[in-house]
Image (cartoon, coloured by chain):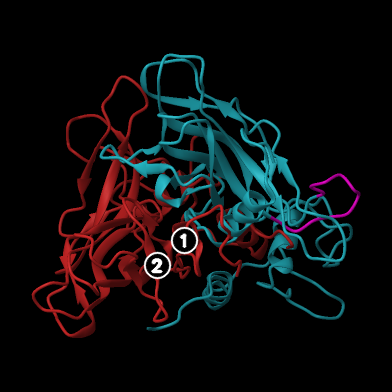
């Protein structure tokens, strides 16, 4: 955790408390194409209290120095994060706004303290321009894991993901946009169905459906999927209902 | 929950208290509800506190009025059809709570920012002496991240938020805002992607929606065809579903 001011224990606790309970935005489109997660400034909680959202809708730092702001973000397991952009209002001086995606360790107790990991490639910094602007990282690829070794101690940590932004005094943030896309999970170590060998044309997709609990195949023992059998309209109904959790009435 | 620390005034904790906004996660095209809880609202120009009833109050009951914002997001193409405000309004002549949805124009550079109220989204308390809910008339606002929201010929980059205003009076309080919305599949394009699913095909819009989402590339690349009447194998079904939903990563 890097801060412009000395790190007091109180601030660390406050940051963790704020991060735990901050709001979550979630994109809800489907398919493998690019998606956008817009993290609006009303989701950012100030580590310093000297800030306001102005008439332009942007979040301004009213403090005397550079202060940190953070927002929780939630992305599906397996999503590839590709780019992070931020909308800013800056002055033409040496100060800059920066933002980045951070994995924040959830401390479960029994050893190890808080820790954070900046996702490689996710840090973006503004240039010295006078006025409103948009700044983006180069393309990068980070697959959202279930757990991650945040502190390098060899153990897998449960994490929450945060967007951290550092705002110099008088500078403002409009929003952070995260570009990401869904992926189908990689093949397991061994095949689940005798008639779908690993590496066959549809094996990655069939294994994904099985792992998600959407299909148990066409036969239990020996386990078969019958990949080349035409699907009936009735089977189609089962697939969609199970996959989407359809449909609970009000 | 953490106790108050001397370095931080109460407002930091009121902002952090309790729940995050709950996003409806159902599928299909039926009505869904996005509940934005009181605790998701950020202090804008003053302190707020969450009362024992879970409602958001002005920390200083004598202040003339306080603003609170909460960012929200919906799937691209979602249609908002109604917004409801849960509030407490004890004193007829004094208390009042108002809310509205706003779009915020983000400025990529060389442009001015701006914002506007989502048409039909203004809602305010009309009841007195207690807790209640008040809703807008049925409305229609299609949610997009990037759209020409002000019809000036340029596509704007947007973020969205709810603005809540606790007006004068000692006890106005905000319980939460509920947004009723439903999914829509994308409108059909002008030209067909596949030669065998022309624009007058009964399933044209649905096939195009799948193609535009990257879920299908058809059954033949050149010339592009979808084979709409071919039967689907169980293996092909697995491809459609796994690609559509990004299945399935273990936790």
Q: Which residue is mark 1?
A: B10
Q: Main secondary structure of the magenta part?
A: loop
Q: Residue furthest right?
A: A154
Which of the two labelled residues, at mark 1 and mark 2, occupies the earlier sequence position?
A: 1
Q: Chain of mark 1?
A: B
Identify the residue at image location x=68%, y=42%.
A7
Is A8 or B227 nearer to us in this picture?
A8
Residue in view at x 81 percent, y 66 percent:
A109
Magenta extent: A149-159
Tag 1 near tag 2, CB within 8 Å:
yes
Q: Position of residue B32 (x, y in %)?
A: 37, 71
- Whether residue A217 is visible to the viewer of this picture, yes or no, is yes
Label 2: chain letter: B
Would you say residue A150 sits in the magenta stretch? yes
Picture colour for chain B: red
Q: Is residue A225 above or below residue A97?
A: below
Residue B183 in the image: above or below residue A214: above
- On the image, the x and y values in percent for residue A121 come to 67, 30
Say which mark, if any, is on residue B49: 2
Q: Nearer the viewer, residue B40 or A226?
A: B40
């Amino acid at each position: 955790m890097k801060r412009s001011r000395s790190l007091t224990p109180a601030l660390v606790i406050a940051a963790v408390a704020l991060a735990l309970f901050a709001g979550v935005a979630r994109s809800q489109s489907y398919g493998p194409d690019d998606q956008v997660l817009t993290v609006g400034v009303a989701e950012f909680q100030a580590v310093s209290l000297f800030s306001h959202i102005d008439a332009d809708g942007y979040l301004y730092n009213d403090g005397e120095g550079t202060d940190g702001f953070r927002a929780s973000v939630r992305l599906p397991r397996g999503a590839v994060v590709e780019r992070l952009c931020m909308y800013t209002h800056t002055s033409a001086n040496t100060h800059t706004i920066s933002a980045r995606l951070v994995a924040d360790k959830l401390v479960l107790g029994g050893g190890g303290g808080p820790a954070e990991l900046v996702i490689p490639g996710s840090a973006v910094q503004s240039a010295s321009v006078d006025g409103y602007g948009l700044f983006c990282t180069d393309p990068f690829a980070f697959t959202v894991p279930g757990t991650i070794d945040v502190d390098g101690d060899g153990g897998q940590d449960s994490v929450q993901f945060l967007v951290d932004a550092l705002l110099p005094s008088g500078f403002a943030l409009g929003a952070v946009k995260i570009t990401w896309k869904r992926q189908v999970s990689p093949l397991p170590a061994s095949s689940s169905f005798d008639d779908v060998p690993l590496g066959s044309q549809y094996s990655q997709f069939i294994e994904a459906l099985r792992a998600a609990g959407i299909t148990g195949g066409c036969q239990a023992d020996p386990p078969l999927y019958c990949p080349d059998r035409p699907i009936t309209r009735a089977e189609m109904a089962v697939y969609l209902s199970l996959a989407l959790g359809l449909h609970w009435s009000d | 929950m953490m106790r108050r620390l001397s370095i931080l005034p109460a407002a930091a904790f009121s902002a952090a208290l309790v729940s995050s906004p709950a996003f409806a996660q159902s599928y299909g095209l039926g009505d869904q509800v996005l509940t934005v809880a009181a605790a998701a609202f950020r202090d804008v120009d003053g302190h707020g506190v969450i009362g024992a009833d879970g409602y958001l109050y002005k920390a200083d009951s004598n202040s003339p009025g306080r603003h609170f914002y909460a960012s929200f997001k919906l799937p691209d193409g979602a249609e908002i059809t109604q917004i409801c405000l849960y509030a407490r309004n004890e004193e007829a002549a004094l208390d009042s709570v108002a809310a509205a949805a706003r779009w915020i124009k983000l400025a990529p550079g060389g442009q001015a920012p701006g914002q506007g109220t989502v048409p039909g989204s203004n809602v305010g308390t009309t009841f007195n002496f207690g807790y209640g809910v008040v809703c807008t008339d049925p409305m229609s606002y299609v949610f997009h991240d990037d759209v020409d929201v002000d019809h000036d010929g340029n596509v704007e980059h947007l973020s969205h938020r709810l603005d809540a205003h606790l007006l004068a009076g000692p006890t106005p309080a905000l319980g939460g805002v509920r947004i009723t919305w439903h999914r829509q599949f994308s409108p059909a394009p002008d030209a067909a992607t596949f030669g065998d699913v022309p624009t007058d095909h009964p399933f044209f819009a649905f096939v195009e929606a799948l193609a535009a989402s990257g879920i299908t590339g058809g059954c033949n690349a050149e010339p592009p065809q979808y084979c709409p009447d071919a039967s689907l194998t169980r293996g092909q079904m697995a491809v459609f579903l796994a690609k559509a939903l990004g299945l399935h990563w273990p936790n």
